[in-house]
């Protein structure tokens, strides 16, 4: 999946300003940034919910244009949105296959498949039948149904927009481990939006740091942590945040600099 020069405007608001990145097959790429950085807008552009103002999206080396979200589904791109987008009045199996045709004779087979998925083991143990209505399920169980709905489409690309943000801390850790195991098993190319830096650092092969619709840095988690491209990335990545001190360069020699920071002199590479 390759994104080149993506711009998105909403009237006078320039939400995305020339975003470029590439996700290799089977790779997990995390999008991180402050509120309003453009993360959700970018995912919705990839999902076909929003049309880019300019720029190109290439999928399997072919330029694509999504006029509507169904085209993204047809291309094998499945999305798990932050609000899950489940239908409260429908049962589990109806939500799993929402928008797809499923004949009545397949329901028993579907139930067996659902119970076989590691991701839905707890859900299967909690309910006697996949005909249970969504309204009766807990937050974690709903989360599993939303992810399961993406799985049954057998996608080539997962788009996940903060899928764990509404869960409590303990359940979020559990679901994070399940998603990591699932991604390793399926080896599906994944774009994962999160505010949680632990999620980004543990789940992602590559991180994209966004600010005000611009890409500040792209790199492996440890690369971004150890060698931030600028002071914004340095202050953003890490928990607790990195301390930043104003420094004065006293001199340079043999590729090293002598600096004075907060009254302390030290050598840096």
Image (tube, grey):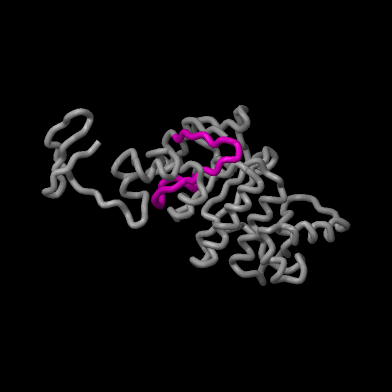
Residue at 52 percent across and 34 percent down: it is: 22
Q: Is residue 143 above or below residue 253?
A: below
Residue 42 or 106: which is nearer the viewer?
Answer: 106
Quarter-wise, where is residue 143 in the image? Answer: bottom right
Q: Is residue 112 left or right of residue 220?
A: right
Q: In the rendering, at what x and y percent does residue 98 appear?
A: 72, 54
Q: In the rendering, at what x and y percent does residue 167 appear?
A: 53, 65
Residue at 67 percent across and 72 percent down: it is: 136
Q: In the rendering, at what x and y percent does residue 129 appear?
A: 77, 68
Can residue 29 be seen from the camera position used here?
yes
Residue 62 or 250: which is nearer the viewer?
Answer: 250
Q: Which residues are magenta?
A: 19-41
Which image quarter holds the N terminus?
top right
Q: Is residue 126 left or right of residue 222?
A: right
In the picture as drawn, the residue positioned furthest to the front comes out as 254
Residue at 75 percent across and 65 percent down: it is: 130
Q: Is residue 90 left or right of residue 159?
A: right
Q: Is residue 147 left or right of residue 231?
A: right
Can residue 12 be seen from the camera position used here?
no
Q: Magenta stretch containing residue 91, yes or no?
A: no
Across the whole image, how many numbered discs are drawn on residues?
Answer: 0
Residue at 37 percent across and 49 percent down: it is: 237
Quarter-wise, where is residue 222 in the image? Answer: top left
Residue 185 or 3: which is nearer the viewer?
Answer: 185
Q: Magenta stretch containing residue 22, yes or no?
A: yes
Which image quarter holds the C terminus?
top left
Q: In the rendering, at what x and y percent does residue 227 appear?
A: 34, 40
Q: Is residue 91 above or below residue 98?
A: below
């Amino acid at each position: 999946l390759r994104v080149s020069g993506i711009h998105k405007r909403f009237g006078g608001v320039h939400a995305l300003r020339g975003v470029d990145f590439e996700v290799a097959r089977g790779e997990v790429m995390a999008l991180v940034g402050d509120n309003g950085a453009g993360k959700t807008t970018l995912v919705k552009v990839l999902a076909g919910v929003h049309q880019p103002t300019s720029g190109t999206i290439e999928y399997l080396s072919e330029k694509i244009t999504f006029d509507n979200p169904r085209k993204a589904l047809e291309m094998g791109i499945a999305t798990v949105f932050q609000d899950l987008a489940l239908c409260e009045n429908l049962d589990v199996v109806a939500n799993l296959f929402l928008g797809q045709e499923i004949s009545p004779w397949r329901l028993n087979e579907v139930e067996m498949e659902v119970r076989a998925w590691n991701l839905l083991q707890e859900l299967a143990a909690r309910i006697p039948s996949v005909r249970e209505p969504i309204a009766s399920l807990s937050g974690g169980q709903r989360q599993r149904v939303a992810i399961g709905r993406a799985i049954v489409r057998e996608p080539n690309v997962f788009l996940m927009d903060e899928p764990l943000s509404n869960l409590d801390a303990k359940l979020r850790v559990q679901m994070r481990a399940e998603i990591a195991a699932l991604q390793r098993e399926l080896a599906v190319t994944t774009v994962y939006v999160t505010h949680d830096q632990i999620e980004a650092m543990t789940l992602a092969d590559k991180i994209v740091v966004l600010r005000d619709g611009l890409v500040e840095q792209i790199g492996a988690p440890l690369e971004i942590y150890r060698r931030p491209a600028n002071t914004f990335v340095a202050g953003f990545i890490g928990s607790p945040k990195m301390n930043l001190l104003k420094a004065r360069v006293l001199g340079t020699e043999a590729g090293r600099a002598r600096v004075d920071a907060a009254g302390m002199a030290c050598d840096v590479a």
